[in-house]
């Protein structure tokens, strides 16, 4: 299933990439998403996070009460226009569920940019995979929206 999300950030592309590689910010995102536990590892402009979340009720019958999500967000250097390209990958431990998306941060002014995320959600469960994708997709969009809300808060400081 194709997913597309667009964020508007009140910060430059460099400021957004720096924020996304800040362990305190990622911890804040995890806590605000309702994670019952999480770990964060930063390697340059690449962020790795693992967290345990309560599964949405309509998904719990397929995956159990708790899901363990892994996330990797990696950014490349800015091009001559200030555009930063990267990738976002989500997975659910022990489940054939993953999201892989291309990420692009495009300057819209000296202190603003737009982030676009385009990719695919794949659930490889025979017979019910497509149904689970339609159930999981809103949670992925909620995760992107939560990241945007926390980024807005942090960038306004």
Image: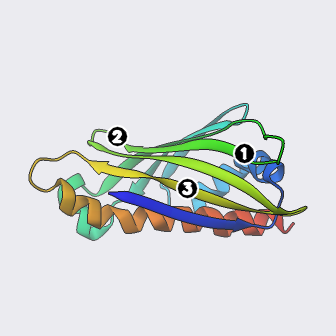
Disc 2: which residue: 93
Would you say the residues marked 1 and 2 are in contact, meaning their CB atoms lie under 8 Å apart? no
Q: Residue 99 at x, y = what percent?
A: 41, 48
Query: Would you place residue 128 above or below residue 126 in this image?
Result: below
Disc 1: which residue: 84
**Is residue 87 shown left or right of residue 119?**
right
Q: Is residue 33 visible?
A: no
Quadrant (top left, top right, bottom left, bottom right) of the N terminus? bottom left
Coloured how? rainbow
- Residue at the image point whose x is 83% and y is 52% from the top: 15
* Residue extending furthest toward the left: 127
Query: Which of pointers 1 and 3 lies earlier in the amino acid sequence?
Result: 1
Q: How far separated are the C-alphas under marks 1 and 3?
A: 12 Å
Q: Nearer the viewer, residue 148 or 115?
A: 115
Query: Would you place residue 144 above or below residue 48 in this image?
Result: below
Where is residue 115, by image quadrant? bottom right
Disc ID at residue 100:
none
Within 10 Å of disc 2 (Cα), the crowding (few <14, some 14-19, many 20+) is: some
Would you say the residues marked 1 and 3 are in contact, meaning their CB atoms lie under 8 Å apart? no
Disc 3 versus disc 2: nearer the observer: 3
Query: Which of pointers 1 and 2 lies earlier in the amino acid sequence?
Result: 1
**Is residue 121 shown left or right of residue 104?**
left
Q: How far separated are the C-alphas under marks 1 and 2?
A: 29 Å
Q: Nearer the viewer, residue 66 or 69?
A: 69
Disc ID at residue 117:
3
**Is residue 145 shown left or right of residue 66?**
right
Q: How far separated are the C-alphas under marks 3 and 2?
A: 22 Å
Disc 1 versus disc 2: nearer the observer: 1
Query: Which of pointers 3 and 2 lies earlier in the amino acid sequence?
Result: 2
Where is residue 133, by image quadrant? bottom left
Q: Residue 146 at x, y = what percent?
A: 58, 66
């Amino acid at each position: 299933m194709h997913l597309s999300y667009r964020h508007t950030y009140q910060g430059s592309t460099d400021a957004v990439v720096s924020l996304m590689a800040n362990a305190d910010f990622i911890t804040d995102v995890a806590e605000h998403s309702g994670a019952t536990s999480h770990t964060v590892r930063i390697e340059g402009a690449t962020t790795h996070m693992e967290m345990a979340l309560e599964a949405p009720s309509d998904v719990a019958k397929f995956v159990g009460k708790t899901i363990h999500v892994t996330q990797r967000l990696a950014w490349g250097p800015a091009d001559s226009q200030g555009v930063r390209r990267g990738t976002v990958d989500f997975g659910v431990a022990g489940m054939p569920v993953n999201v892989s998306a291309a990420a692009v941060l495009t300057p819209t002014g000296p202190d603003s940019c737009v982030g676009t995320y385009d990719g695919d959600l794949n659930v490889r469960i025979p017979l019910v995979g497509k149904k689970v994708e339609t159930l999981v997709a809103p949670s992925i969009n909620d995760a992107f929206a939560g990241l945007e809300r926390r980024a807005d808060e942090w960038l306004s400081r």
